[in-house]
Image: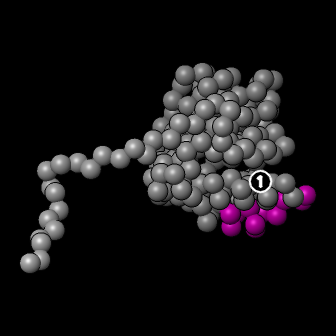
Amino acid sequence: MIQDLKEDYFNDLLEDNATIILPEEGEELALNDIRFTFKVTSEMSNGQLGVYTIALAPMAIGAKPHYHRFMDEIFIVDKGLLTLQVGQKEFQASPGAIVYVPRFTPHGFRNDTDEEVRLTLLFNPSQKREGFFRGLHETLGEDPIDPKKYLKLYNKYDSFPVDISNMIPKR
């Protein structure tokens, strides 16, 4: 006798899949004036969410104005005063500020102060953003920086500079 294997439409199948990431944990990449730490990766979230911490040294540029087609981005300021450009507006975000940037919204961010700025960055979906940060680490570590290689990296990971002639995050 063959048993019918029916799917249970009425009960949830619970799993124990939580991950706890302590403040000092995560893979860190350090550039000259920026440190990225991977907290929740694309692999962990099945591509749905990326959570990263970023430390910007004094006067560091995180990113020149750009936009994303397929992901939303959230900035949470943890320490310091972050300068954000969203669309045509520019403003200062202090600790505790949360800035939601939906897809197709031009945005950029930088530290215009003499103190370190720390923020938490969330991408939804994550679009394998770790590859983007690893590519930034490689590309921005080269001297001179190759704009064509930088643009190729940007476009591969759903980032599109507003001004291709002024896209490299240098002052």
**Dividing the image into 4 quarters, which one contains the C terminus?**
top right
Query: 58 left or right of 101?
Result: right
Residue at 61% of width from left, 25% of height from top?
A: 78
Asked if the magenta segment contains residue 9, the reply would be no
Q: Residue furthest bottom?
A: 1
Residue 155 % position (x, y): 62, 64
Between 131 and 102, the one lying in front of the other is: 131
Between 62 and 21, the one lying in front of the other is: 21
Highlighted magenta segment, given as a residue range: 143-153
Residue at 11% of width from left, 77% of height from top?
A: 2
Residue 148 % position (x, y): 76, 67
Residue 31 % position (x, y): 81, 46
**Dividing the image into 4 quarters, which one contains the N terminus?**
bottom left
Classify mark 1: helix, strand or loop.
helix
* Up-down relation of residue 116 to residue 42 (above or below): above
Q: Of the residues shown, which amino acid type is indicated by label 1? A: His
Give the colour scheme of this rendering: one colour
Residue at 35% of width from left, 47% of height from top?
A: 15
Q: Which residue is mark 1?
A: 137
* Up-down relation of residue 165 to residue 112 (above or below): below
Marks counted in the figure total: 1
